[in-house]
Image: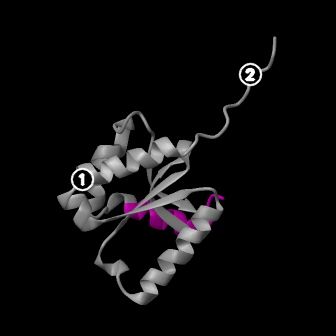
Amino acid sequence: MVAKDSRLLKFAQAMRHEPTEAEKRLWNCLRNRTLNGYKFSRQVPIGNFIADFVCRERKLIIEVDGVTHGDASDVAYDERRTQFLEGQGYTVIRAFNHDVYKNLDGVLQTILVALERNPSPPAARAPLP
């Protein structure tokens, strides 16, 4: 389900122009098919939410969370959001800013494991001659 709300699309675009430092660092490792050839997009509207990074081929979402995701209401919101995204067929991985700064290789390894575990959607069959 792709968002049609123009306000959400504009907000996603603004977020692409002003990423957090952790998002910049991770994006440098994901962009241009750098991570084992997988294509990622950033700040992608899905339903009424914006996913930080999405690999559509493997239906994988990576969320980069800072300290603002620590209180009970934020945790509850993140859980509802994750349930919605998983209901759309995505797997959601959360990485904390601290991990991106201190253990980027470990974050990338976790992402690779999830990419390899998620089956790709069935390929379109070519018509028979």
Helix, strand, or loop for circle 2?
Answer: loop
At horizontal 48% and vertical 52% (from top left) the residue drawn is 54
Q: Can residue 48 be seen in this view?
A: no
* The one of 56 and 3 positioned closer to us in this rendering: 56
Q: Can residue 43 be seen in this view?
A: yes
Instruction: From the top left corner, tell me how far across and down residue 20 is, in percent.
Output: 28, 64
Image depth: mark 1 or mark 2 in front: 1
The local crowd at label 2, few if under 14, some if 14 to 19, many if 20 or more residues have their Cα within 10 Å, is few
- Side (left or right) of 84 relative to 100: right
At horizontal 50% and vertical 52% (from top left) the residue drawn is 60
Residue furthest top as drawn: 129
In this picture, is 35 found above or below 114?
A: above
Residue 126 is marked as 2
At horizontal 29% and vertical 78% (from top left) the residue drawn is 67
Instruction: From the top left corner, tell me how far across and down residue 11 is, in percent.
Output: 46, 67
Q: Is the magenta region chiefly helix, strand or loop?
A: helix
Instruction: From the top left corner, tell me how far across and down residue 46 is, in percent.
Output: 58, 61
Residue furthest right as drawn: 129
Real-space Cα distance between discs 1 and 2?
40 Å
Task: Say how the picture is coloured.
Answer: one colour
- Side (left or right) of 7 relative to 13: right
- Residue located beneath label 1 in the image: 104
Residue 18 falls in image quadrant: bottom left
Helix, strand, or loop for circle 1?
Answer: helix
In this picture, is 50 found above or below 40?
A: below
Is 20 a magenta residue? no
Q: Mark 1 is on which residue type? A: Leu
Stretch in magenta: 1-15
